[in-house]
């Protein structure tokens, strides 16, 4: 089940990215995604650790929603 991904194409693309050549994040959303990808953590795993819905974390990473100040503190400590 380690290789399970509901978005196979998305996962394939990210596994092919040379993590050393990723551009530096310029926004909070890019920063949290960059940290997650370089740590090789799944979106589902991080969302579970933060006790939030994976779709909400995905929206944060796509800059479609902004996290609350309390959630930013939790993410910061993660």
Image (tube, rainbow, N blue to C red):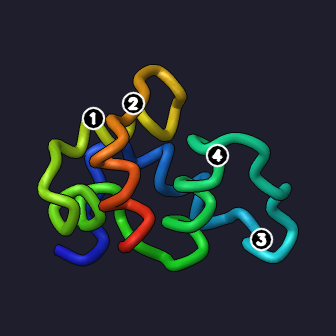
Label 4: which residue?
Answer: 30
- The C terminus lies in quadrant: bottom left
Q: Tell me the distance, in whole angstroms, between the alpha carbons under discs 1 and 4.
A: 15 Å
Nearer the observer, 75 or 57: 75
Compared with 32, 45 (above or below) is below
Q: Position of residue 56 (x, y in %)?
A: 27, 35
Q: Is residue 45 left or right of residue 38?
A: left
Q: Residue at x 30, y 48 (%)?
A: 71
Name the residue at the top extreme.
64
Q: Tell me the distance, in whole angstroms, between the alpha carbons under discs 4 and 2.
A: 11 Å
Q: Position of residue 29 (x, y in %)?
A: 57, 41
Label 2: which residue?
Answer: 59
Q: Residue at x 38, y 72 (%)?
A: 77
Dot 1 or dot 3, earlier in sequence: 3
Q: Tell me the distance, in whole angstroms, between the alpha carbons under discs 1 and 3.
A: 26 Å
Q: Give neighbour class at mark 4: few <14, some 14-19, many 20+ (Cα, 10 Å).
A: some
């Amino acid at each position: 089940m380690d290789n399970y991904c509901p978005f196979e194409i998305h996962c394939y693309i990210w596994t092919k990215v040379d993590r050393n050549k990723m551009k530096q994040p310029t926004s909070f959303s890019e920063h949290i995604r960059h940290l997650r990808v370089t740590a090789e953590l799944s979106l589902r795993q991080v969302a579970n650790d933060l006790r939030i819905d994976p779709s909400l974390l995905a929206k944060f990473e796509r800059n479609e929603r902004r996290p609350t100040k309390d959630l930013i503190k939790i993410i910061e400590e993660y």
